[in-house]
Image: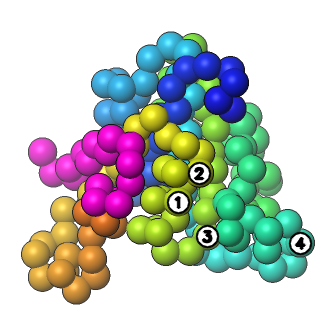
Amino acid sequence: MAESGGRRIGVAVDFSECSKKALSWAIDNVVRDGDHLILITIAHDMNYEEGEMQLWETVGSPFIPLSEFSDAAVMKKYSVKPDAETLDIVNTAARKKTVTVVMKIYWGDPREKICAAAEQIPLSSLVMGNRGLGGLKRMIMGSVSNHVVNNVACPVTVVKAHT
């Protein structure tokens, strides 16, 4: 992917309202013509019936082109269901800007896998949402965005859920 030029802008997506807000913000404020927009998602279930899934557990899926991740039948194999609004956001961006949109799926702990993605791809920058957990919940559950900000080398922008 690096050979074709352009920056690699990662957006962590879980198809929640705050991740859609982060995706829209990235498209409006960061992504420019010639960039690669890489949607990074963390799946919870791994279908061990599929032989390649065991290989992908460590390195993540191959890059999935927009035309394929817009196809529910293709995404069923990955146990990921992008919602219509997220697909609309990225399809509109692909039409309006000269960007390459792909998705990469990881399985496991979102904190660890988003950090691994930033390093392995490698990303020029990363945009992610935060759920705006209260102090106690954040202390107990740990903030994914806080962990990522403190553990990746590339610049990270956290788009707050409530602004």
Give percent across and percent down for residue 40: 53, 51
The numbered mark, 3 or 2, whose residue comes first in the sequence reads: 3
Work out which quarter of the rendered image holds the C terminus and state it: top left
Q: Nearer the viewer, residue 65 or 59?
A: 59
The numbered mark, 4 or 3, whose residue comes first in the sequence reads: 4
**Helix, strand or loop at disc 4?**
helix
Contact check, label 3 and label 1, Cβ < 8 Å: no
Q: CA distance from mark 4 to mark 3?
A: 15 Å
Task: Tell me the residue that label 4 is attached to.
Answer: 51
Question: What is the span of residues highlighted in magenta in the rendered image?
Answer: 148-163
In the rendered view, tell whether residue 73 sits above or below residue 38.
below
Q: CA distance from mark 1 to mark 4?
A: 22 Å
Task: Tell me the residue that label 3 is attached to.
Answer: 107
Residue 99 lies left or right of residue 149; in this view the side is right
- On residue 116, which mark appears? 1
Contact check, label 1 and label 2, Cβ < 8 Å: yes
Q: Residue at x 33, y 41 (%)?
A: 155
